[in-house]
Amino acid sequence: MLRAVISALLVAIFSGSASADSVFTYQGLLHDGGSLATGDYAVSFSLWDAPAGGNQIASTININPVSVADGKFSVELDFGAAAFTNADRWLEIVVNGSTLDPRQRITRAPYSIQTRGIFVDQNENVGIGTLSPQSPMHVVGDTRIDGRTALPSAVRPSA
Protein backbone atom coordinates (compact mmCIF):
# COMPACT_ATOMS: atom_id res chain seq x y z
CA MET A 1 0.00 0.00 0.00
CA LEU A 2 1.38 3.38 -1.00
CA ARG A 3 1.27 6.25 1.45
CA ALA A 4 2.87 9.64 1.81
CA VAL A 5 4.54 10.13 5.15
CA ILE A 6 6.10 13.55 4.82
CA SER A 7 5.05 15.53 1.80
CA ALA A 8 4.86 19.09 2.94
CA LEU A 9 7.92 20.97 1.72
CA LEU A 10 7.04 23.46 -0.97
CA VAL A 11 9.66 25.81 -2.34
CA ALA A 12 8.91 28.57 -4.82
CA ILE A 13 11.12 28.65 -7.87
CA PHE A 14 11.40 31.97 -9.65
CA SER A 15 13.00 32.87 -12.93
CA GLY A 16 13.03 35.80 -15.28
CA SER A 17 10.44 34.47 -17.71
CA ALA A 18 6.72 35.02 -17.17
CA SER A 19 5.92 31.40 -18.07
CA ALA A 20 7.94 30.08 -15.10
CA ASP A 21 6.57 32.48 -12.48
CA SER A 22 4.15 29.94 -11.02
CA VAL A 23 6.42 26.88 -10.93
CA PHE A 24 7.10 25.41 -7.50
CA THR A 25 8.93 22.35 -6.27
CA TYR A 26 7.09 19.64 -4.34
CA GLN A 27 9.18 17.17 -2.34
CA GLY A 28 7.73 14.09 -0.73
CA LEU A 29 8.49 10.86 1.08
CA LEU A 30 6.72 7.76 -0.25
CA HIS A 31 6.28 4.38 1.42
CA ASP A 32 5.32 1.25 -0.52
CA GLY A 33 4.15 -1.74 1.54
CA GLY A 34 5.62 -0.37 4.79
CA SER A 35 9.09 0.28 3.33
CA LEU A 36 10.61 3.34 1.76
CA ALA A 37 9.71 3.25 -1.92
CA THR A 38 12.35 2.98 -4.63
CA GLY A 39 11.72 2.92 -8.36
CA ASP A 40 9.68 4.72 -10.98
CA TYR A 41 6.06 5.60 -10.30
CA ALA A 42 3.25 7.23 -12.32
CA VAL A 43 2.10 10.22 -10.26
CA SER A 44 -0.76 12.67 -10.83
CA PHE A 45 -1.13 15.97 -8.98
CA SER A 46 -4.33 17.99 -8.78
CA LEU A 47 -5.12 21.21 -6.93
CA TRP A 48 -8.31 21.55 -4.85
CA ASP A 49 -10.12 24.25 -2.86
CA ALA A 50 -10.94 21.95 0.09
CA PRO A 51 -9.19 19.23 2.11
CA ALA A 52 -11.91 16.75 1.00
CA GLY A 53 -14.55 17.07 -1.70
CA GLY A 54 -14.56 20.60 -3.07
CA ASN A 55 -13.67 21.79 -6.54
CA GLN A 56 -10.61 21.05 -8.61
CA ILE A 57 -8.58 24.15 -9.50
CA ALA A 58 -6.62 24.01 -12.79
CA SER A 59 -5.76 20.90 -14.78
CA THR A 60 -4.28 17.69 -13.40
CA ILE A 61 -0.53 17.32 -13.86
CA ASN A 62 0.58 13.79 -14.77
CA ILE A 63 4.25 12.88 -14.41
CA ASN A 64 5.44 9.46 -15.52
CA PRO A 65 7.87 8.39 -14.39
CA VAL A 66 8.66 10.02 -11.06
CA SER A 67 11.92 8.54 -9.81
CA VAL A 68 11.81 7.68 -6.12
CA ALA A 69 14.96 6.75 -4.17
CA ASP A 70 14.86 5.76 -0.49
CA GLY A 71 11.29 7.10 -0.45
CA LYS A 72 12.30 10.59 -1.56
CA PHE A 73 11.08 12.34 -4.69
CA SER A 74 10.96 15.86 -6.03
CA VAL A 75 8.87 17.29 -8.87
CA GLU A 76 8.24 20.71 -10.34
CA LEU A 77 4.57 21.66 -10.62
CA ASP A 78 2.90 24.54 -12.42
CA PHE A 79 -0.85 25.01 -12.03
CA GLY A 80 -0.58 28.58 -13.36
CA ALA A 81 -0.54 31.85 -11.44
CA ALA A 82 -4.34 32.20 -11.64
CA ALA A 83 -4.75 29.06 -9.47
CA PHE A 84 -3.35 30.94 -6.47
CA THR A 85 -5.84 33.68 -5.60
CA ASN A 86 -4.94 33.81 -1.87
CA ALA A 87 -7.61 31.20 -1.10
CA ASP A 88 -6.64 27.95 0.65
CA ARG A 89 -5.50 25.15 -1.68
CA TRP A 90 -4.79 21.42 -1.21
CA LEU A 91 -2.73 19.08 -3.36
CA GLU A 92 -4.17 15.66 -4.16
CA ILE A 93 -1.63 13.02 -5.18
CA VAL A 94 -2.39 9.79 -7.03
CA VAL A 95 0.43 7.22 -7.26
CA ASN A 96 0.05 4.29 -9.67
CA GLY A 97 -3.74 4.74 -9.53
CA SER A 98 -3.97 4.95 -5.69
CA THR A 99 -5.12 8.26 -4.20
CA LEU A 100 -3.04 9.25 -1.18
CA ASP A 101 -4.94 10.53 1.83
CA PRO A 102 -5.12 13.18 3.16
CA ARG A 103 -4.63 15.93 0.61
CA GLN A 104 -1.62 18.11 1.36
CA ARG A 105 -2.28 21.75 2.27
CA ILE A 106 -0.34 24.17 0.08
CA THR A 107 1.63 26.55 2.24
CA ARG A 108 2.33 30.15 1.34
CA ALA A 109 5.50 29.77 -0.76
CA PRO A 110 3.56 29.51 -4.07
CA TYR A 111 1.34 32.35 -2.91
CA SER A 112 4.28 34.75 -3.12
CA ILE A 113 3.22 34.96 -6.78
CA GLN A 114 0.06 36.80 -5.68
CA THR A 115 0.81 38.95 -2.65
CA ARG A 116 -2.10 40.41 -0.63
CA GLY A 117 -4.40 41.29 -3.49
CA ILE A 118 -1.73 42.06 -6.09
CA PHE A 119 -2.09 39.88 -9.17
CA VAL A 120 0.34 39.67 -12.08
CA ASP A 121 -0.93 37.91 -15.20
CA GLN A 122 1.07 36.04 -17.85
CA ASN A 123 1.52 39.31 -19.79
CA GLU A 124 3.02 40.96 -16.68
CA ASN A 125 -0.02 43.25 -16.26
CA VAL A 126 -0.48 44.15 -12.58
CA GLY A 127 -3.92 44.08 -11.02
CA ILE A 128 -4.80 45.44 -7.59
CA GLY A 129 -8.29 44.39 -6.54
CA THR A 130 -8.76 42.42 -9.78
CA LEU A 131 -7.65 39.03 -11.12
CA SER A 132 -8.06 40.30 -14.71
CA PRO A 133 -5.84 43.34 -15.21
CA GLN A 134 -6.65 45.09 -18.50
CA SER A 135 -3.52 47.29 -18.65
CA PRO A 136 0.04 47.36 -17.28
CA MET A 137 -1.40 48.75 -13.98
CA HIS A 138 -5.09 48.17 -13.29
CA VAL A 139 -6.52 49.25 -9.92
CA VAL A 140 -10.13 48.53 -8.93
CA GLY A 141 -11.57 50.66 -6.12
CA ASP A 142 -10.58 53.93 -4.49
CA THR A 143 -6.89 54.64 -4.08
CA ARG A 144 -4.80 56.75 -1.70
CA ILE A 145 -1.65 58.44 -2.92
CA ASP A 146 0.59 60.30 -0.48
CA GLY A 147 -2.14 60.44 2.14
CA ARG A 148 -4.83 61.81 -0.16
CA THR A 149 -7.76 59.92 -1.57
CA ALA A 150 -7.78 59.92 -5.36
CA LEU A 151 -11.19 60.61 -6.81
CA PRO A 152 -12.70 57.99 -9.11
CA SER A 153 -12.47 59.17 -12.75
CA ALA A 154 -16.28 59.53 -12.91
CA VAL A 155 -16.23 62.34 -10.32
CA ARG A 156 -12.94 64.06 -11.17
CA PRO A 157 -13.34 67.67 -12.27
CA SER A 158 -12.48 68.21 -15.92
CA ALA A 159 -9.33 70.22 -16.68
Image: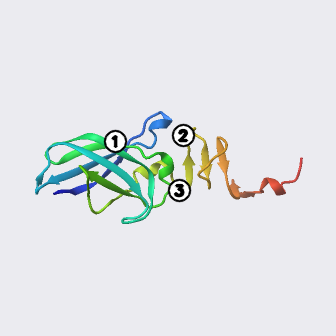
Kind of element beneath mark 1: strand
Give the left or right position of residue 24, taking residue 68 as reference: right
Kind of element beneath mark 2: loop
Name the mark nearer the viewer: 2 or 3. 2
Q: Are marks 1 and 2 in contact (CB under 8 Å)?
A: no
Spot occupied by residue 17 in the image (x, y as percentages of width and height): 48, 33
Spot occupied by residue 102 in the image (x, y as percentages of width and height): 29, 63
Is residue 5 in sight in this rendering?
Answer: yes
Kind of element beneath mark 3: loop
Camera-nearest residue between 81 and 1: 1
Q: Earlier in the sequence, mark 3 or mark 1?
A: 1
Q: Which residue is mark 3?
A: 116
Separation of residues labelled 3 and 1 (CA atoms):
24 Å
The amino acid beneath tag 2 is Gln
Q: Which residue is mark 2?
A: 122
Where 31 sits versus 24, above or below?
Answer: below
Camera-nearest residue between 153 and 132: 132
Give the left or right position of residue 90, taking residue 67 as reference: right
Residue 104's mark?
Answer: none
Residue at position x 41%, y 44% in the image? 78
Q: Which residue is mark 1?
A: 76
Separation of residues labelled 2 and 3 (CA atoms):
18 Å
Residue at position x 60%, y 42% in the image? 125
